[in-house]
Image (tube, helix red, strand yellow):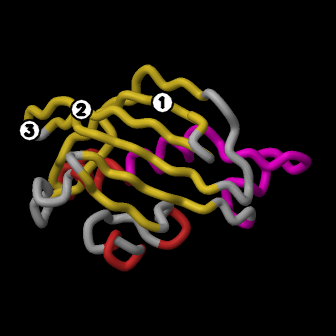
Amino acid sequence: MDRKEIEKIIPHRASMLLLDEVETKDGEAIGKYRVRGDEFFLDGHFPSLKIVPGVILTEILAQSACVLLDGKIEKDQIPVYSGLDKVRFKSPVFPGDEYETHVKIVKARAPFYFLEGTGYVDGKIAVTASFSFALTGKENLCSQKS
């Protein structure tokens, strides 16, 4: 699916939608993001050697995971990170790279979903992580703000 189809599933837009395409196959989400080099997160990271920040790489894993949660998310719900564990950065990601994610659900106990993901560039592992999401009502998030 392309960006327009992805927008029907996940709430991210504009500069924070970090998937160009994604497909689901055999219970796994396979996402792709082409690093252009003009993204906001590269402005100061680092000016002399632009490297995609690790937090952005894990965010792209998370967005791929949200596609797997399609059908489990009710209209008034939003998926939010509830944990990020065992994150390992193996190799850097640079402008011009195509970052490919592979994410699968390993356990579910609604409203919590536990996943594992790996990000690659040219078949080489860039990051691995275990993480979890909670599906929560948007009103619950807003009530915590005050």
Q: Position of residue 48 (x, y in %)?
A: 91, 48
Tell which of 142 and 100 is nearer to you: 100
Secondary structure of residue under mark 1: strand
Tell which of 111 and 24 is nearer to you: 24
Q: Position of residue 80 (x, y in %)?
A: 30, 46
Secondary structure of residue under mark 2: strand
Taking the image as shown, residue 19 lies to the left or right of residue 114, namely right
Tell me if residue 56 is in the magenta stretch. Answer: yes
Q: Which residue is mark 3?
A: 110
Residue type highlighted by circle 1: Thr
Tell which of 139 and 74 is nearer to you: 74
Q: Give the quadrant of residue 114.
A: top left
Q: Give the vertical position of 95 relative to 52 (above or below).
A: below
Q: Which residue is mark 1?
A: 128
Q: Position of residue 65 (x, y in %)?
A: 32, 48
Can residue 146 be seen in the rendering of this structure?
Answer: no
Residue type highlighted by circle 3: Ala
Q: Disc 3 to disc 2, how far (Cα)?
A: 10 Å
Can residue 133 be seen in the rendering of this structure?
Answer: yes
Magenta residues (range)? 38-63
Judge depth for marks 3 and 2 and give the one in front: 2
Residue type highlighted by circle 2: Phe
Q: Give the vertical position of 49 relative to 142 (above or below).
A: above
Residue drawn at (29%, 53%) of the image: 66
Which mark, residue 114? 2
Q: Give the quadrant of residue 93.
A: top right
Q: Quadrant of the N terminus?
A: bottom left
Judge depth for marks 3 and 1 and give the one in front: 1
Taking the image as shown, residue 123 lies to the left or right of residue 37, namely left
**From this viewpoint, which residue is outermost toward the bottom?**
4
